[in-house]
Every structure is written in C-alpha cells, then in structure tokens.
Amino acid sequence: MSDDLTILHNPRCSTSRAALEAAEASALKLNVHNYLKVPLSEQDWLEVIAKLDGDPTELVRRDPNFARSGLSDDDVRTPEQIAKVLAEHPELAQRPVLIRGDRAIIGRPKDAVGPFLGS
C-alpha cells in the first residue's frame, strides 16, 4: 500500500483531530485537506467513493444540517447523488476520511484509524 496518506479533515471535530494526531505519529507522508475551506468537486468525491471501504451513503452525515438542506435518504442513494450532495454541502461530509493508495475509510470509530494506518 502507498506511503502517502490524505486526510479529509475538519479541525473542529475531535475525531478528525485524533486521526490527524495518529497519522502524524506514523511514518506516512501526510496530506491534510480541510474540505470545508477547499471543498472537493463532484469528481473528487466520486474518486473517494470508488476507494471507500463500506457503504458510500455513510459518507453523508444525517445531522440537523441534512434536514435543513431539504435532503432525505432518497437524495443520497447512488454514488453520483452522494458526490453531488457533498460537493454542494461539504459540511455534511462524515469526518475524517482517510485515503491511502486505492483504499479509503471513514475514521469512525476512532479505533478504525490505527489498523488503516498500519496496513
């Protein structure tokens, strides 16, 4: 697996900060991407989704912002829908997302990060 790691990071999130701290302690070459300041495009999200371990719809947070945005589960069923929603509403992205080589994970729960960094 690649020695390069990208973290889609939200510095206000304690889980994201914990993943960043673990990544900084690893020997991996780290790229930190604050997706709220520099949002990903639909194409970028599709690339993340293609690498994601697990169900892509888990990338979308179902928090009060989701409902305020007028969205429902029907709006985030396909990879294309998910990419569009996250490109338009980056605050709805689950965080952190760790990308290494051809794999990506959502760094929740926190104990998922260590095995991914060591793989």
Image (cartoon, rainbow, N blue to C red):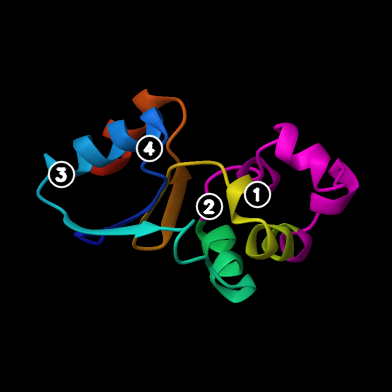
Q: Residue at left 79%, top 51%? A: 76
Q: Earlier in the sequence, mark 4 or mark 3?
A: 4
Q: Earlier in the sequence, mark 2 or mark 4?
A: 4
Q: Secondary structure at mark 1?
A: helix
Q: What label does residue 52 carry, if any?
A: 2
> Could you tell me residue 60's position as x and y percent?
66, 44
What residue range appears in magenta?
Answer: 52-81
Hey, what amino acid is under mark 1? Pro
Hey, what amino acid is under mark 4? Ser
Q: Quadrant of the N terminus?
A: bottom left
Res. 4 in view: yes
Q: Residue at left 78%, top 61%? A: 81
User: How far apart are the alpha carbons under marks 2 and 4?
Assistant: 17 Å
Label 2: few (<14), some or many (≥20) within 10 Å?
Answer: many
Q: What label does residue 16 carry, if any?
A: 4
| Left or right: 85 as drawn, with respect to 28 | right
User: How far apart are the alpha carbons under marks 2 and 1?
Assistant: 7 Å
User: How far apart are the alpha carbons under marks 3 and 1?
Assistant: 26 Å
Give the vertical position of 106 relative to 29 (above or below).
Answer: above
Q: Which residue is mark 3?
A: 24
Q: Nearer the viewer, mark 2 or mark 3?
A: 3
Q: What label does residue 56 carry, if any?
A: 1
